Structure formats: C-alpha cells, structure tokens
Image (tube, helix red, strand yellow):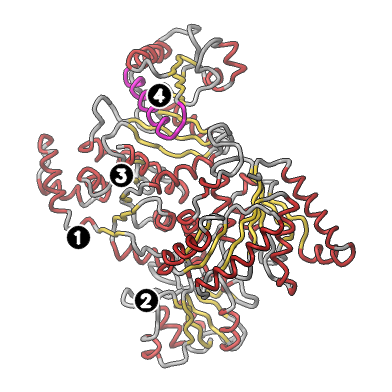
C-alpha cells in the first residue's frame, strides 16, 4: 500500500474537509512525521482552507510539513504559459521534497471553485497517479437517490480503474441519519466491498455559521460582542418586521434576529429574551440600515449577570444584509472545538481505517508524541463509554469540555450544579447541552438515599443525618457518592476547588483497593517524543519507605494501563551505593520492598534523575542496570521535589502534564488543577473512563 493518500472530491459540497480532518486525526495518533500536501491551494483572504485548519489545529505536530505546490493563480499561469505537463512536474517536485521528510503524506485535491471544475476529478486523478498515492474519492450523497448515487460512483470508479490508480476506499458523505442503514446496505450489495465504502451521516450543525462568522462579513460592525458569545451557533434567521408580541411568537432556538437599527422595541425585546428562561436562546441581533439606537438604549446592551446578547450592525438595507448572511456557511476551525469534535466523531463512526493497513511506522515502534498519546486516550475511552460525573458543572471550562466529550463520544457526562445556572452559562457561550444529564444535588431524588448511606458509613465518626445532608449538598460529596453507589463510573473535579476538597470524600467512603495501603497520584508527562510517569506529585507530603514502595507499585500499574512499559526509577540525590543518610536510605529501603513484593517489576534505586533518563550518564553511574537511562516511571522521594519537578518540566520542556491521576482507590476519582484548560479536562475525563473500564 502506498505511503500517501490523495483525497479527491467528486463534485461540489462533498464535505471533503471532514475527511481531511478525520484522516489527519487518525494519522497523527499513530505516527509522528505526517505531512499534508495540497497540489493547488485555495486562494482565501479569510484563511478558511484545509491548510490553515491543519496548520493551526496541529501546530507543533505538523510544523514545516504543510505544503502547497502552487496557488490557483500560479497554477493557471504555469498551465497557460508552459502547458499541463509543466504544472504536473512542479507539483510532483514539491511533493517529493515533502515526502522525504515524512513517514506518511496526506494529500488533498482541488476544491471545484473555478470554471474548469467539469474536468477537475480527472485532473486530481492524474495528480494522484503521478504521486503514487492511493485515491480516496469523496461523494456527496445528499439530495440524491441511492440509485443515482450508485450510477455516479460506478462511472467515476470506472474512470479510475482505467488509469490503474489504486483506490484506498470511497467515502459517501452527507447521508441523512435515517437513511444510513439503507444506503450502506445498497452500496454493499452494489460494490461487494470493493473498494471499501464509508458512509458518513449528514450533520447540519457543521454548516451553521457562528456569530464569529457573521461578524467577519465585510462591513459588519461589532456593537456589543464579547469573546464568549462569538461561538453562538446561528441555526435560523428571523427578520423582525412585526410588532413585538407577534415577533416573539416566531422566535426559534439559535435564531439570528435581523431588524432595522431604529427598532428600539425589537432591540429591547431581544435583550429581555436573552435573559428569560421562558424563550428560546437566540444567537444574536443584527441592526441594519446604518441606523443605531439612542445612547440610552445602547446602554442596555451590557448584560447583567450573564454575557451580553451579541449585537452587530450593518450599513446595508435589511434585504441586502439577509442575502449576505444567508450566504455565510459554517467552517471547521480550531476556534470552534465542538464542530471539530463532531466532525471527528462522524468520521470515526463510519471509517474503519485500521482495516486498510496504511503503511507508516507503527505506534509501538515510533516515538510517542503528546498528540499520539492524547488521541489514543480518546479512542480507548470512546470504545467502551463510561458515565463520568463532573461536580463543577457551572464552570465555563467544564461546559466547553462537556460539549467536546459529548461530540466525540468519549463518555456519558453528568453535570452537577444549579440547573438554571448551568443552562444559562451554556447558552451564553453558544454551547448545547442536549443529551447531557444535569443534576442539582439539593433537588435530586437521589439525595435522601445518599444522606442515609453516608450517615451510616460515617456513624463511627459521629456523623448525624443533618450533618450528612449538609455534606451531600456539596457537589463533590454528591458526585463521589454517585460513584460509590454505581450511579456513575468515575468522577473528575478540582477546576474550582482544592485537591483536598476533591479527594476527601473518596478517602471517607470509596476507600483504597485491597492490598493498597494509601491513595497516591501520578502525572502523565507527555514530552516531545515520549510519555513518562511522575509520582507522587500531588497527595503524599513525606511518604515512608513502605509508602514509597506502594506508590511505585501503583504507578507501575497505572503506567501499564496506558501502554507505557514500567521501568521504575526510585529517585534520590545519589545513585547506587554512592550515598548514605536518612533520605537515601529511605529510598533504598523502598526499592528493596518493591523488589520483594513485585519481583516482576524492573526497578532501580536510589538513582539520580540524569542517570535514570540519559543513557550516557547511566553507563558511567549505573552500568549494567536494566532501568538506568531507560526509566519510564519516576518516583520522587517527597511531595516537595515531585511537585516542583513536574512543574519545572511542564514549563521549561513545554510538556503536556496530564493529571494528577489518582491511583489506589476502589473506583476512579481524579483531580484537576485550578488552572486547567479545556484540553486538560477532556484528557482527564478520558483517563478516568479508561480506569473505569479496567475495573
């Protein structure tokens, strides 16, 4: 099989960008030198191209390996001056230079934007053949009968067959959900699996523009738009020409209201709708005609207690403004993470890429990049979805992470908090929580049973029913009890609370696993070319020798769970027998206990960090050690050294630090840093789901 794939549209509006994004996500999760090649780049002043999408979304992973041979204007000039063969020669030369630096190259064909589009598929076919790439044609299956679709596919695949260009698979995109099974069955009968055919469902929300897209229209003025509201999705357009009572009855979810700038009554009504739970959440308001409200009305635009309604202005008359807005379509962009997650999920659900046996360096033999590790986490979690509760449901980062987790199918999410507050904040940020369970602990029918059980479990500590109820009103306690009672498979918290507040309930009634004496933590440190395990960097301040041994054994189990071969370095300020003293002796004793309890584990200690991680140093300080120079699990002697070390590596080496991952509990509960990002939350939920799978 060739080491490159050429994605070619077979017409307009095939949704090729979904295939490009899904393929890149797959490839970067399995190899670390992936290139992206466009023979002819789309000219775009807006940057809305697949090249910008790939470059921006995977900056460090593809830096210097996103290449276009020509722009459209350059290609047309060369073809007119020197002929089509000169154009093909230049494309091949540009591709060859890129391929030398890559394990695999994903190529994306032209976009059917010029007058010569009638011959565009044949042009892309010739390029794919010249590059020696396997073809991945993409068909638009929307608003076409299955019979007609099969005829089109047979005709184009016959042309491909005549050129002897290998076809990796065929993608049929934009099939309505209710027609998926019927279409797949008909295509399977028609083509007998040769080539493999992946049928992708249509998702209208991917084409919905956001307020950000509308604000980018030439001449649009931002009167009152904050950063959070830019992501609101425009699902409908409503021109407000009626009186207010009639206008209000026509509002729909995600509607963008367009009205003349002198309609202060419509403006004030929209501001009230934005604050009212009794009306649909509208996307925003566009004032037309170059007319602006009076200053006193303008002051109403600043929301009280929630994000302001996005309000734009245009100098065009209402009819012209509507025409411009209707032409605006949604686009996959790193600024729209929910859309990206949805696109990946659509592609992954339909495309069995592992069955195609693409040729690139296998993951097990290649350096593991942070991106590869993160993608593997998400894929493992989504393979067997677990129910994860997030007690801090009112936090904006949690809400953004929830939409991504839901779109990618990583886990079933339960959010705790005030339901009205959660719903309002989600709407303010343009987020949909459809399908996500929201629970207010104070109003939940689960509360009474939780209170009774907690009081019984903690009766020996003098906990009464009133005290138990007070505790169970705390989302961290409520969420932990959900895990304890089997109402959830795991919990992730800490975005707004301390580590102690997050894990205290689990210490009280989830308890440790049999054979484990204490709860500890590790960070999964994703460096440029490998993933290491650091422990304990968050929980135990000054572990004894026996506790250090337990931490090491638990860390080895966590390491193996995530396919990192455990080679344990018990860290100290001296290596081998070169040092003595209380601190070194404690580490030496811990190493002895690990070897005694788990003789199957590779462990070395005491050992210094440089001897554990660098082979040149290991040869001089610890010759003959099976761990020195190759350690993957680093056990620090105390919390002070561990916490500072992980932060130093995170900041200076630009490592992705995932954690702290708690280990030793009967059921998975994990902590977040209060400075966590949305990506941190997504990764931690995925880890928690994987831990739950292992139970």
Residue occupying the point 57% across, 15% down: 618
Q: What residue is shown with label 2?
A: 280
Q: Please say if 678 is above or below 432.
A: above
Circle 3 or circle 4, nearest the eye = 3
Q: Please say if 581 is above or below 380.
A: above
- What segment is highlighted magenta in the picture? 546-565
**How many neighbours does mark 1 have within 10 angstroms: few (below 14), some (14-19), or many (20 or more)?**
few
Mark sitting earlier along the chain (2/1) = 2
Mark sitting earlier along the chain (2/4) = 2
Circle 2 or circle 4, nearest the eye = 2
Q: Please say if 668 is above or below 277.
A: above
Tell whether 591 sits left or right of 220.
Answer: left
Tell whether 304 sits left or right of 368.
Answer: left
Residue 391, position in %: x, y? 31, 51
Report the magenta stretch's main SS.
Answer: helix
Mark seen at residue 638: 4
Residue 687, position in %: x, y? 40, 41
Pick out the residue farthest to the right. Answer: 81
Tell whether 176 sits left or right of 490.
Answer: right
Q: Are marks 2 and 3 in contact (CB under 8 Å)?
A: no
Along the line of sight, the residue nearer the viewer: 174 or 1: 1
């Amino acid at each position: 099989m060739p080491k490159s794939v050429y994605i070619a549209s077979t017409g307009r509006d095939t949704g090729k960008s979904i295939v490009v994004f899904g393929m890149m996500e797959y490839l970067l999760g399995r190899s670390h030198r992936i290139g992206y090649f466009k023979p002819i780049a789309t000219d775009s002043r807006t940057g809305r191209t697949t090249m910008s999408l790939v470059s921006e979304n995977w900056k460090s992973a593809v830096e210097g390996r996103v290449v276009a041979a020509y722009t459209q204007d350059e290609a047309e000039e060369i073809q007119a001056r020197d002929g089509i063969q000169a154009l093909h020669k230049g494309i091949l030369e540009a591709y060859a230079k890129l391929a030398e630096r890559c394990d695999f190259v994903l190529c994306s064909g032209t976009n059917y934007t010029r007058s010569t589009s009638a011959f565009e598929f044949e042009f892309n076919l010739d390029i794919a053949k010249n590059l020696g790439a396997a073809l991945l044609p993409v068909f638009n299956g929307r608003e076409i009968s299955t019979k007609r679709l099969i005829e089109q596919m047979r005709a184009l695949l016959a042309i491909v067959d005549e050129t002897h260009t290998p076809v990796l698979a065929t993608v049929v995109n934009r099939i309505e959900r209710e027609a998926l099974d019927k279409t797949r069955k008909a295509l399977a009968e028609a083509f007998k699996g040769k080539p493999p055919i992946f049928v992708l469902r249509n998702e209208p929300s991917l084409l919905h523009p956001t307020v950000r897209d509308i604000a980018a229209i030439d001449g649009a003025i931002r009167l009152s738009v904050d950063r959070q509201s830019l992501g609101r999705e425009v699902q409908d357009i409503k021109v407000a020409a009626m009186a207010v009572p009639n206008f209000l009855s026509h509002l729909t979810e995600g509607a963008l209201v367009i009205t003349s700038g002198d309609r202060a009554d419509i403006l004030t009504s929209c501001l009230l709708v934005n604050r009212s739970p009794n009306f649909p959440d509208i996307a925003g308001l566009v004032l037309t005609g170059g007319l602006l409200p009076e200053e006193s009305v303008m002051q109403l635009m600043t929301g009280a207690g929630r994000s302001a309604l996005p309000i734009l202005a245009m100098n065009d008359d209402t009819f012209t403004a509507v025409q411009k807005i209707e032409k605006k379509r949604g686009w996959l962009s790193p600024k729209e993470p929910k859309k990206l997650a949805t696109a990946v999920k659509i592609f992954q659900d339909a495309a069995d890429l592992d069955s195609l046996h693409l040729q690139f360096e296998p993951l097990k033999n290649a350096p593991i990049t942070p991106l590869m590790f993160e993608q593997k986490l998400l894929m493992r979690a989504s393979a067997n979805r677990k129910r994860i509760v997030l007690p801090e449901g009112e936090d904006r980062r949690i809400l953004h992470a929830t939409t991504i987790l839901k779109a990618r199918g990583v886990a079933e999410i339960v959010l705790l908090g005030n339901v009205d507050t959660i719903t309002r904040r989600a709407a303010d940020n343009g987020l949909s929580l459809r399908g996500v369970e929201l629970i207010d602990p104070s109003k939940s029918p689960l509360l009474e049973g939780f209170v009774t059980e907690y009081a019984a479990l903690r009766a020996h500590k003098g906990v009464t029913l009133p005290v138990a109820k007070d505790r169970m009103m705390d989302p961290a306690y409520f969420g932990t009890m959900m895990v304890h009672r089997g109402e959830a498979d795991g919990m992730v918290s800490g975005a707004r609370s301390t580590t102690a507040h997050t894990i205290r309930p689990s210490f009280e009634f989830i308890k440790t696993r049999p054979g484990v004496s204490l709860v500890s933590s590790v960070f999964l440190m994703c460096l440029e070319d490998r993933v290491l395990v650091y422990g304990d960097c968050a929980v135990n301040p000054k572990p004894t020798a026996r506790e250090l041994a337990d931490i090491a054994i638990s860390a080895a189990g966590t390491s193996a769970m995530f396919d990192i071969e455990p080679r344990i370095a018990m860290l100290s300020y001296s290596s081998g027998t070169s040092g003595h003293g209380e601190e070194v002796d404690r580490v030496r004793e811990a190493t002895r206990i690990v070897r005694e309890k788990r003789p199957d584990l590779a462990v070395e200690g005491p050992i210094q960090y440089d001897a554990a991680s660098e082979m040149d140093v290991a040869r001089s300080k610890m010759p003959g050690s099976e761990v020195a120079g190759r350690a993957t699990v680093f056990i620090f002697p105390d919390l002070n050294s561990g916490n500072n070390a992980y932060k130093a590596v995170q900041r200076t080496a630009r490592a992705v630090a995932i954690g702290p991952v708690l280990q030793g509990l009967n059921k998975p509960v994990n902590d977040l840093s209060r400075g966590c990002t949305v990506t941190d939350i997504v990764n931690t939920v995925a880890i928690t789901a994987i831990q739950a799978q292992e139970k």
